[in-house]
Image (cartoon, helix red, strand yellow):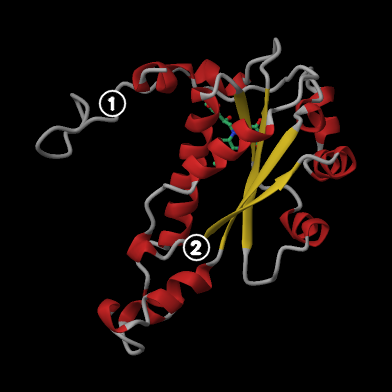
Amino acid sequence: MEFDEVVRRRRMVRNYTDDPVDGEVLDRILDRAQRAPSAGFSQGVSFVVITGEERRAEIARLGHEEEYLADGFDPWISRAPVHVVICVSMDAYLERYREEDKGGPDSRTANEEGWPIPYWWVDAGASMMLLLLAVVDEGLAAGFLGSHNLGELSTLLDIPDHVAPIGVVTIGHAADDRRSGSLARGRRSDAIHREHWESPAGD
Ligand SMILES: Cc1cc2nc3c(=O)[nH]c(=O)nc-3n(C[C@H](O)[C@H](O)[C@H](O)COP(=O)(O)O)c2cc1C
């Protein structure tokens, strides 16, 4: 698939067929997701891949799937044959930036407070996007479930304390789904500023 088509096709899909995701296809997707950039090549992002039905059902419960059902959505979380929990370790960044080529143990970024932008969250987002695009490139569909019960999710999946799950990417074969009401907001047309930050006329 051409890159432009992958980008245009990507959207959060909130329903899947019963068809499983081929193991080799999943491996390719995960391989590509690991090619995301990371600050200092810290590589602090990890992925927990879940295909077991019971665990997926539990993740759906922690993600308040019943609220989606009450809003007219399909059981898109439990129905997705694959869940990928994207995780990131801040410690990986602090350790990397204590190395000599990054300023050593006394550098500003040796501690969390010294980071004007916490790059671990930036990198987790970049990995998430690459994962979503890799899924589309394989002719599959994905959705993202944000922050519900992340502590319990960690417990369920044995994620260690120093690693933070940022959310769940659901992957499967697309089925007809209900679109998010948020899309009614329409696409912004004022995000690009050229040469300097232009304010809208009249401001
Ligand atoms: C950080 C982040 C968190 C999100 N959390 C949720 C979520 O918890 N549940 C959900 O249904 N969609 C979630 N979404 C999907 C957004 O609603 C969706 O990306 C947005 O409405 C634009 O639609 P599109 O991605 O289909 O183009 C999230 C998206 C992002 C980037």
Give the SS element for disc 2: loop
Name the residue located 41 percent from the left edge and 23 percent from the top edge: 7
- Measured along the vertical axis of the image, is residue 124 above or below residue 155? above
Give the SS element for disc 1: loop
Q: Earlier in the sequence, mark 2 or mark 1?
A: 2
Percent coordinates x, y for residue 115 in the rendering: 37, 70
The kind of residue on which mark 1 rests is Asp
Percent coordinates x, y for residue 181 in the rendering: 62, 19
Q: Residue furthest front?
A: 24
Residue position marked by numbered label 2 in the rendering: 44
Q: Nearer the viewer, residue 157 or 145?
A: 157
Q: Quadrant of residue 110?
A: bottom left
Name the residue located 54 percent from the left edge and 37 percent from the top edge: 28
Name the residue located 81 percent from the left edge and 33 percent from the top edge: 65
The kind of residue on which mark 2 rests is Gly
Residue position marked by numbered label 1 in the rendering: 190
Residue 48 located left or right of residue 90: right
Residue 143 located left or right of residue 90: right
How many neighbours does mark 1 have within 10 angstroms: few (below 14), some (14-19), or many (20 or more)?
few
Instruction: Tell me the quadrant of the picture where the N terminus can be found.
Output: top left
Q: Residue furthest bottom?
A: 106
Percent coordinates x, y for residue 93 in the rendering: 44, 70
Mark 2: C-beta under 8 Å from nearest atom of ligand 1: no
Residue 192 located left or right of residue 148: left
